Structure formats: structure tokens, C-alpha cells
Image (cartoon, rainbow, N blue to C red):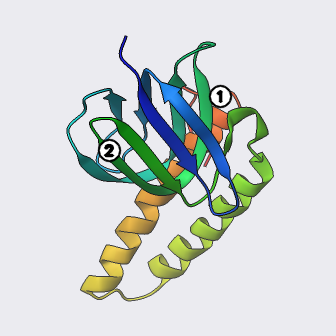
Amino acid sequence: MATFHFDLVSPSKLVFSGEVEQVDVPGLEGDFGVLAGHAPTIATLKPGIITVFGDGGPKRYVVLGGFAEVSPDALTILADFGWPFDEADPAFIETRIKELEERRDKLQAGQLDYSERAQLDRAIERLDHFYVLNRNVQGQAGTPAAH
């Protein structure tokens, strides 16, 4: 299978760099796979898991959002936060969930104008993404949300 170059960059470090065969990406508009020769694309990421296929079998990485830039011969992901899956910090993710729940609750408590309703919708959507990510990190994918 043809390969392409993939870089996963977080603010503090280069998380992954190398030649890969495929990368599955958690896009905000829907998850998507990247292969060599992919059409140029820029996408916003949702919190989720990136799966990288190449030498040594699949490797997984956790991201909490960011951007992906795809070209026919490269993929670069600039993640808000990114770690190898086995280094993901469930406590950090839980803290982010609590912050988002507080924001949602604060918005729901007031009389909302149009822009505040849009903020509430985005907060609920982002919270849903974090719930799914948290279940995956905790090893409970496919179980009903506890929140």
C-alpha cells in the first residue's frame, strides 16, 4: 500500500512523525480516513481518537480538538492537546467535561438571545464529543453515557 508523511503536533511536542499507510481522523463534520493521494483538505477536529496504520500495526492517539491539513502526500494535525492513547489522562478529560457542564448549565439558566442559544448548542455538542472520548479512554465504548 502507498504511504504518505504524517505529523501529529501538540503545543508542547511532536507526538508522532513518520510514513504511514492510513490515518483515521475525528473530524467535526464527520470522521474521515486519509490515504496517500487524498484530495487537499482542511478540517476542524473534534475531541476523539486518531488511528494510524503503518508499520507495527495500528496506533491510537487522543486529541481534544484542533485542525488537520491534508495534501496528496502529507497529513499534518495541529492538536489542541494530543497524546498516545495509553498516555491519555482520564482525570484531565473529566476536568474538561466538568468545565463544559458548568458552561452548559450557566447558559441554560438564563434567558438566551440568538447568539447565546448558538453558544449553548456548541457547548452541548462539544460536551457530547467529550463524553464519547471519555468512554473510549475508560474502555467503555458502546455503553450508554453516564452523564
Tag count: 2
Question: Quadrant where the N terminus lies?
Answer: top left
**Residue 35, above or below 103:** above
Label 2 crowding class (10 Å Cα cut-off): few <14, some 14-19, many 20+? many
What residue is at 61 percent from the left and 73 percent from the top? 102
Horizontal side of 40 relative to 35 (left or right) equals: left
* Residue type beneath disc 2: Val
Residue 100: image x %, image y %? 58, 67
**Residue 84, above or below 29:** above
Instruction: Give me the disc on residue 73.
Output: none
| Quarter of the figure with residue 3 | top left
Residue assigned mark 2: 70
| Quarter of the figure with residue 136 | top right
What residue is at 25 percent from the left and 47 percent from the top? 41
**Residue 46, above or below 5:** below
| 105 and 50: which is toward the camera | 50
| 105 and 131: which is toward the camera | 131
Distance in Å between CA atoms under marks 2 and 1: 31 Å
Q: Earlier in the sequence, mark 2 or mark 1?
A: 2
Residue 20: image x %, image y %? 48, 25
Horizontal side of 109 relative to 138 (left or right) equals: left
Residue assigned mark 1: 140
**Residue farthest left in this picture:** 39
* Residue type beneath disc 1: Gln
